[in-house]
Amino acid sequence: MEFITDFYLFLASVVLISLSGVMMPGPLFAVTIEKAAKRKNAGLLISAGHGIVEFPLMFLIYYGLTQFVIPAIVQITVGLIGGLLMMYMGVQTFRNRKKTSEKHESPKQDSLIAGIWTTAANAGFILWWLTIGTTLIMNAKIFGLLGFSVFAVTHWLCDFLWYTVVAVVIFKSRRFWTERVHQAIFIFCFAVLVGFGAWFFSSALWLAINTLV
């Protein structure tokens, strides 16, 4: 029973962290806005393209973590860097809360291809998975392959739901995408990123104290 409870709590944290990441304005978000102006299902196709790149990367990281013994120092380093990165992202999000989303001109291509290309070419996406994402996968590994698979699908569904909803709203009417909505999203991202970042960092620090001291 405790195992199941822990798993549900873990999934809840995955949803919050994933949403805080996907809601932050970036290349993929900008492409979604651009494509959604002309196509209602642009978000669906873009998130599918995103998943084509993301799923293999998630399973590659999981495979590496399960096939090789990960030294404690590596786990600690990833946790510390991931925690610091999340807190930094949260602070930057709060500082930029009054700025509009960045402009992004993508080539004239299908939304699916745009999702693949924008994801693969985004250095921030790779950095996120090498730090924050790897920390989440290390936690998911506790629940085995099935638990990790549920984690992977849950994470991607957050991307899928967000980009799909954003695209439909923008296609229907841009007037719903107001400054107040932007402010609320940024504050949500700030709270989640800083809170979980502090948790990741303190957990890694506690592991370091108990392992290396």
Image: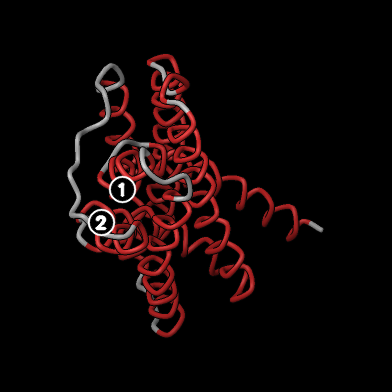
Say whether residue 8 is left or right of residue 103. right
Say whether residue 126 is left or right of residue 163. left
Q: Which residue occupies the foreground of this view, 20 or 76? A: 20
Dividing the picture into quadrants, the one containing residue 62 is: bottom left
Which of the two labelled residues, at mark 2 and mark 1, occupies the earlier sequence position? Answer: 1
Q: Residue at x 43, y 32 (%)?
A: 170
Which mark identifies residue 19?
none
Q: Is residue 56 above or below residue 75?
A: below
Q: Is residue 157 above or below residue 70?
A: above
Q: Residue lying furthest front in this view? A: 38
Q: Is residue 181 above or below residue 108?
A: above
Number of numbered callouts drawn: 2
**Residue 31 position within the rendered picture, expressed as x and y whole percent measured from the top left:** 29, 45
| Secondary structure found at label 1 | helix
Q: Which residue occupies the foreground of this view, 150 or 83? A: 150
Q: Give the class, few, some or many, for how many residues have Cα within 10 Å of label 1's Cα (few <14, many ≥20).
A: many
Whether pointer 2 and pointer 1 mark residues with C-beta atoms closer than 8 Å, the reply is yes
Q: Three-letter amino acid code at disc 2?
A: Thr
Q: Provide the residue designation for mark 1.
A: 28
Q: Residue at x 31, y 36 (%)?
A: 25
Say whether residue 134 is left or right of residue 156. left
Q: Is residue 208 above or below residue 38?
A: below
Q: Residue at x 25, y 63 (%)?
A: 120
Say whether residue 90 is left or right of residue 157. left
Q: Three-letter amino acid code at disc 1?
A: Leu
Q: Provide the residue designation for mark 2.
A: 118
